Image (cartoon, helix red, strand yellow):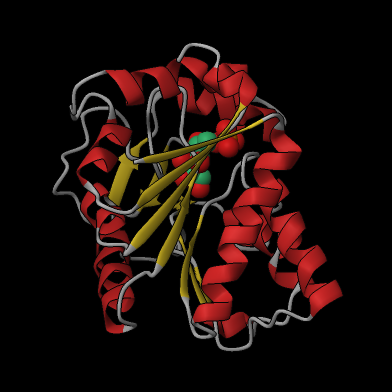
Amino acid sequence: MKLITTSNYEKLSQQAAVETISRIKRNSSLNLGLATGSTPTGLYQELIKDHKQNKTSYKEINTFNLDEYIGISKKDSNSYHYFMCEHLFEHIDIPLDQTHIPDGTAKDLDEECKRYEQFINEHGGIDLQILGIGQNGHIGFNEPGTPFDSRTHIIDLAESTRKANSRFFDSLEDVPKQAITMGIASIMDSREIFLLVSGASKAKALATLMNDDISEDFPASALKNHGNVTIFADKDATALL
Ligand code: F6R
């Protein structure tokens, strides 16, 4: 894993954007894996800025999001569908039918997991996957203990994850208890991975990732088995390295 350290979050977002845009310039029909949460929003802002200033086009790009809450409709402001439209899709020239996110309201959720996994494969797999990391080491919503050979599946969210994400909801009770997430094996199939780590609250997770052994108890450690991972970390996140 290659580690790029930046002085602050803004620089992290800019550097991750420069690298992402270079992949899009190299391959105008890139399959781009996306994450939600606070960490990648700066990157998305930089991509929007670049699209407006330099006309980088997303017309042939397909995007695949890592995860979606179960039981929240696409129109709900807490859905990841809504999040992605608001933070990225509405501001670039990507046709919305080329943006793909698991459907957390599907009648048959197991079938939806299979469909999503197969759908990504039918599109030729993910060229570049953007990831954030949970304080407990989760990637996507693969909580500690998730098998490394997991594919897209339904996951019970850890209490710590629900608490961390309750900042987006009116109350903790409103945070869904389950989500659909790409599995660890699905993520590892990506040809390249950018892991974004920002802030003091992620310092322990980054130190565990860099220093400890590979273990299913710390999902992000699977990335050590991947040959093409770049970690973008700001100074606060590297405090314990
Ligand atoms: C979101 C996702 C999660 C987040 C992680 C960090 O799609 O897959 O793994 O990346 O929970 O979230 P933030 O960036 O809000 O700290």
* Percent of width and height locating residue 86: 75, 60
Q: Residue at x 39, y 26 (%)?
A: 158
**On-image quarter of the C terminus:** top left
**Residue 50 in the image: above or below residue 96:** above
Which residue is found at the position 43% from the left and 64% from the top? 128
Report the side of 33 relative to 188 (left or right): right
Decide: is 187 above or below 114: above
Left or right of residue 23, residue 91 in this image: right
Near-viewer residue (209 or 34): 209
Describe residue 152's horizontal placement relative to residue 235 as left or right. Answer: left
Can the viewer see residue 224 in this picture?
A: yes
Q: Position of residue 110 (x, y in %)?
A: 25, 60
Q: Residue furthest bottom?
A: 60
Q: Position of residue 119 (x, y in %)?
A: 32, 77
Quadrant of the image occupied by residue 190: bottom left
Q: Look at the image and tell me in which quarter the N terminus lies.
A: top left
Residue farthest toward the top in the current orientation of the protein: 240
Find residue 59 and report its horizontal and vertical position in percent: 63, 88
